[in-house]
Image: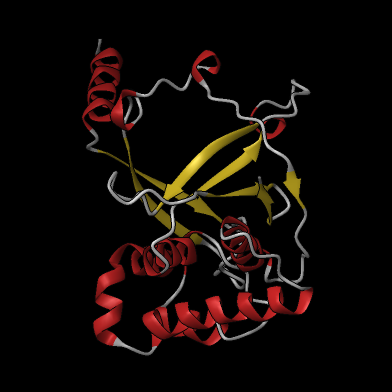
Amino acid sequence: MAASSSNDTILEQLRNGSAQFELVSSSPVASISTPNPTPSTILRFFARVGPPPGGVSSSNSNIKVERFSVHKVTGDGRCMFRALVKGMARNKGITLTPRQERDNADELRAAVKEVICEDDNERRQYKEAVTAITVDEPLHRYCQRIGRSDFWGGESELLVLSKLCNQQIVVYIPETEHNSSKRGSGFIPIAEYGAVKKKQPRHVVRLLYSGKNHYDLLV
């Protein structure tokens, strides 16, 4: 009876979000945004049992699979920035040369660095991005890394650039990465940034994120 009562308590804590856990590992998995993780890292987090936010079901029958063509992007550390500038240019009917694509990608990275690292007033407008950054590393360390040409862009930079460029961005993964038992050729949306007002429709830039930490453009 005591064990049953304890289980009931734990389940109730899981349902209401008050359960706390500690994950202790002597050899933690390295994050792509945390080059030198500290051994014996202890992570505290909350868990909640229930439907995802908004009541969206996670069952396979309700997953939205979309079809696009993949435009490959050079994997030189700028791939996310390259894919984004390529998509925005394409939406304007502009074709970039390889050099223009590279230079514009570097300009986007520099723009993120400016608003996050060099201007306190600007940084206050991007609290979500700062939170995402500082979960993995101190802000000053991030600001040292983002200036390098091989800096990998990700969620934090998409949060900034979607707002800075007033650009709606949707990130997808291959259908096969969601369910390895299938051989589908479609793509599943996993994140959306920069939703715009209905009175200001804009072309969406769709990015494909693969399990190899690489971004391509979907059209």
Q: Which corner quadrant holds the C terminus? A: top right
Q: Which corner quadrant holds the N terminus? A: top left
Q: Give 78 or 40, whichever is nearer the viewer.
A: 78
Placement of 132 over or under 204, stated as above or below = below
Q: Is residue 81 left or right of residue 98?
A: left
How many numbered tags mark residues here?
0
Q: Give 7 or 201, whichever is nearer the viewer.
A: 201
In the image, farthest residue toward the bottom: 118
Q: Where residue 170 sits in the image (x, y, percent)?
A: 51, 46
Q: Is residue 31 left or right of residue 79?
A: left
Q: Where residue 31 sits in the image (x, y, percent)?
A: 59, 60
Is residue 147 among the parts visible in the rendering?
yes
Q: Where residue 122 sits in the image (x, y, percent)?
A: 29, 80
Q: Quadrant of residue 156?
A: bottom left
Q: Is residue 86 left or right of residue 203?
A: right
User: Residue at the location (60% across, 66% down)?
Assistant: 85
Q: Where residue 160 sits in the image (x, y, percent)?
A: 41, 67
In the image, farthest residue toward the top: 1
Q: Give 147 or 165, whichever is nearer the viewer.
A: 165
User: Residue at the location (34% across, 65% down)?
Assistant: 131
Q: Quadrant of residue 107?
A: bottom right
In the image, farthest residue toward the front: 93
User: Residue at the location (27% across, 86% down)?
Assistant: 120
Q: Quadrant of residue 91?
A: bottom right
